[in-house]
Amino acid sequence: MKTNSSNSLLTVSTGPLKISELPPNPCTGNEFIHLSLVIPTYKERDNIRNIVSILSQLLDESIAGNYELIVVDDDSPDRTWEIAQSLTTEYPQLRVMRRQQERGLSSAVIRGWQAATGSVLGVIDGDLQHPPEVLMQLLRNIEQGADLAVASRHVEGGGVSSWSVVRRFLSRGAQLLGLVILPGVLGRVSDPMSGYFMVRRSAIAGATLNPVGYKILLEVIGRGKVDQVAEVGYVFCERKEGESKVTWKQYIDYIHHLVRLRLTTGGAGRLSRKVNFPVGRFLRFGLVGFSGVFVDLTVFHLLRTVIHLGLTRSTILSAGVAIINNFLWNDLWTFSDISQGQRAPHQRFKRFLKFSAVCLAGVILQALIINFLYNVLEINQYLAKLIAIAVATIWNFWINLKLSWRVTDVK
């Protein structure tokens, strides 16, 4: 590992954002460090001492002397890097990098990994919003064979502390957009927006990474050689010190990143290798959807022949009744293994809202398809309706599967 002898700061690499193969431990010349954990920071002087202390204690209990913490600071005006540097005498596994020419969380993480000597590379926020106690669960998953271990808010044990409805909507909306643009990438994990994960160095060594914004996990999945993925639930906590870095520009950067990956990886990257498709769940979902077909067609027929509503309104209303039917059966049967642990009325209502939002897009898709088939191609209205239902059912299952059936509560 290169250091600047005048101030003991790590030298910032230049050139392409590419991770090299595993280098030797500079202290022994022939051994490797097990874990290199990067902590990207900007204006985190109020948090840096605390997180270094907590992480060091956790890792000393499990892999003492076989890890390194790398703080990569983007030349914070509050001199976070200077505070971190002052801790290196107390915490010998701590390394510090001060970047003065580059900015951005994703590139900071990669520059830290370039200076790292670990066979496992990780990242955690420096603001204590990522609970450090999850760290060892991630590492155990890597040691048990996973190429990538992700801390997720959307699996069992996961959630958010006190997000507003707007922020929840934006987060899920961003994930849904990603699933549409990059299904082969975002479909691999339940929380592709996570910034808390570990990856085997060998999975990304040699790949030129080209991130935009702050979602480095997208780049790792999209360009890495990731076979086995593991997820660990965690509750995202609100920061206690410092200020939030979330801005609208980050959402724009996220969309830019999705489009760039779509164009450069063909949508799947290198990771379309092994998918554990839930056949049983799909069959249950399909049977529920089949019952919904009869509900939908029956209501559609009554609306058209008895009430004499127009085609589009009949399609939307009949589909709405079918959505209620399908949700109840899916909640009680298809996803019962998940919903049994969340029986409170408000939790069921939240699941219904989420299911309805996904299905609403399916209803719009139905209306577009049936109008095209009936009015343009002049196909029988009932056959057109069946075709539209089939397409919408596939949409509804896939998106609900990827967004997860459970809901996250404030904790």
Image (spheres, rainbow, N blue to C red):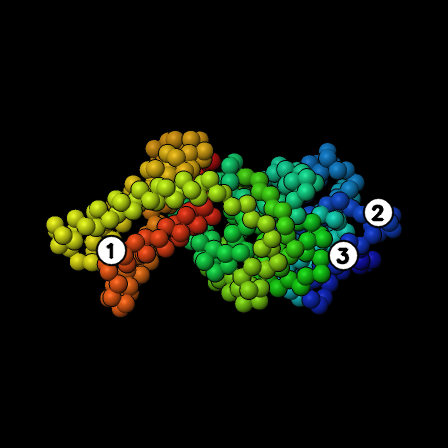
Residue under label 2, please give it.
Answer: 31
Query: How far across and down, in percent of the image, does residue 253 sit?
Result: 51, 62
Q: Which residue is mark 3?
A: 21
| Kind of residue at badge 3 | Glu
Residue 130 visible (yes or no): no
Q: Are marks 2 and 1 in contact (CB under 8 Å)?
A: no
Q: Which residue is mark 1?
A: 382
Q: Badge 1 local density, few (<14 within 10 Å), some, or many (20+)?
A: some
Q: Is residue 263 visible?
A: yes
| Residue at 44% from the left image edge and 50% from the top image edge | 398
Q: Percent x, y for residue 383?
A: 27, 57
Left or right: 341, with 299 as reference point: right
Residue located at (73% from left, 45% from top) = 35
For marks 1 and 3, give the CA distance.
60 Å
Give the quadrant of the N terminus.
bottom right
Q: Residue at x 80, y 54 (%)?
A: 23
